Amino acid sequence: MPRSILACAAALLLTAVAAPARAAEAAFKAAYASAEAANAEAGKLRNQWTTAVAALAAAKKAAEAGDFDKATSEARKSEQLSRAAIFQADEQKTNWKLMEIR
Amino acid sequence: MTGLAMAAALIAAPSFAAPAADAPDPAADLKAFQKYFRDKFPKVKFEDFVNGPYSMDEGLYRQWKEKEEFPPYEFALDLGKELMAKPFGNGKTLADCFPNKGVGIRQDYPYFDTEQGKVVTLELAVNQCREANGEPPYSYVKDEMAAVTAYMAFTSRGKPFDVKIPDDPRALAAYENGKRYFYTRRGQLNFSCATCHVQSPGERIRAEVLAPALGILNAMPIYRSEWSGMGTTSRRFTSCNSQVRGVPLKPQDEDYRDLEYYLSYVSNGLPISGPGARP
Amino acid sequence: MASSIRVRATSRGDTTEVQALVQHPMDSGFVKNARGELIPPHFIQRLAIEHDGKPVFVADWGPAVSKDPYLKFAFKGGKAGDELKVSWTDNKGATDQLTTKIQ
């Protein structure tokens, strides 16, 4: 319920005031760009997470539907997941040996 | 004299230990790997490890024995046999590409091809053969590929895995890379292959009993009731990756081939039991 | 083209045990393909097994039966060498049959 009210409010805002909408779009673009970069970096390490990729796709979809708030939050979520994947891959570069049977 | 030697050994020990642990020694790995599973499951007969979850659970074992009387992979075997002998556009057949017409050779794959400088798995060899004869490659994960490899495995049943690492630094590097992949944690769930198949075989994951890594590839390809169809080693690897929420690599990616190389090598001596049937 | 039916029938004293496997997609009509389109229903409606021309097992199947169905049953009578005929018909009118001998 609060979500739909918010959406209505957002829609009203969109028509009434153009400036905040443009700001939301700019925020999304920045968040999406860094999420994409983090995802690409995880890809280079051959360790993308399915959840990060899914959030990135959700962000794109929300942005296309004009819901920049949701898009920005999905993009940020995706970036955080990718950062964790990168950390994991870096840490495992040497630590995989801890599990080895000797 | 002895005192001096001891002192020398003491001094040498710390600087010596680190590189020794890191120097690749596949033969020692194999011994340690097989010993780990023998010690963990003293009641399981060595050659039974190839039967995956059935070697771990008595009830499942009885169900499987019954199923083996009329196995679900029968249709795949017939299709595989047919495809092996079916002529390509140029008149040659898939069987022509393999030693002994592809019969009874499963245990020799994967091997390190010194000319191509990479690991060649049975699945890769099948598609290399098709492409060399101007035919489109099969999908790596199921259908025809599974049928053909099922037929080859079936005709090799009982033959012990005989994967060799030639005297070539690239082969050893591939082996090491496969080992790294096997033990590396990945995906959001932070699992490595070893998390399930070394630390927890015999335990349940949801409704399924986990198979031990030892002998796991001997049963490939498999008919899985969950897939209601056949799947290859490639399918198993990619679906394992997505289950831990990692984006899988492309089938027959270098990492996957190296992984198959490592995992097959440490199961050397265990008989081929494929195609398998799994819940 | 190999037959879609596999049968094994074994005589055990005064009964005969039959196992059969049929290759069929058994699409229920409720499942979608990768493009999101419904896969039209395609399933076996009737499966019959006859011993010397007399039906011993008749099944009315529907969309709830699994892909490549397997079945096992035993009936009284039958001896090694007797003929056993397995046949099926699906909702698209396709049919297949196989005659085998009891072992």
Image (cartoon, grey):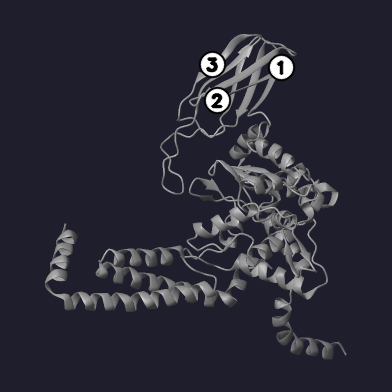
Chain containing mark 2: C
Can you say whether A101 is above or below B62 in the image?
below
Tell me the kind of residue under disc 2: Ala
The location of residue A43, given as percent across then percent down, is: 51, 72
Residue at x-position 38% and y-position 70%: A78
Is A98 situated above or below B104? below
CA gap between label 3 and label 2 equals 17 Å
Whether residue A83 is visible, yes or no, is no
Write the residue at 14% across / 61% down: A5
Quick one: SS at disc 2?
loop
**Spatial CA span between label 1 and label 3:** 18 Å
Q: Earlier in the sequence, mark 3 or mark 2?
A: 3
The amino acid beneath tag 1 is Ile
- Residue, far right: B1
Q: Amino acid at mark 3?
A: Val
Residue B54: percent from left, percent from top? 63, 43
Q: Position of residue B61 (x, y in %)?
A: 63, 39
Label 1 is found on which chain of the structure?
C
Question: Image quadrant of residue B170?
Answer: bottom right
Q: Which residue is mark 1?
A: C102
- Specify few, some or many for label 3: CA neighbours under 10 Å numbering under 14, 14-19, or 20 or more: some
Is residue C38 visible in the rendered image? The answer is yes
Chain holding disc 3: C
In the rendered image, the vertical position of residue A46 relative to residue B239, given as above or below? below
- Whole-number angstrom distance, CA of label 1 to CA of label 2: 26 Å
Pointers 1 and 3 in contact (CB under 8 A)? no
User: Residue at the location (67% across, 35% down)?
Assistant: B68
| Residue that carries the numbered disc 3 in the rendered image | C58
Mark on residue C94? 2
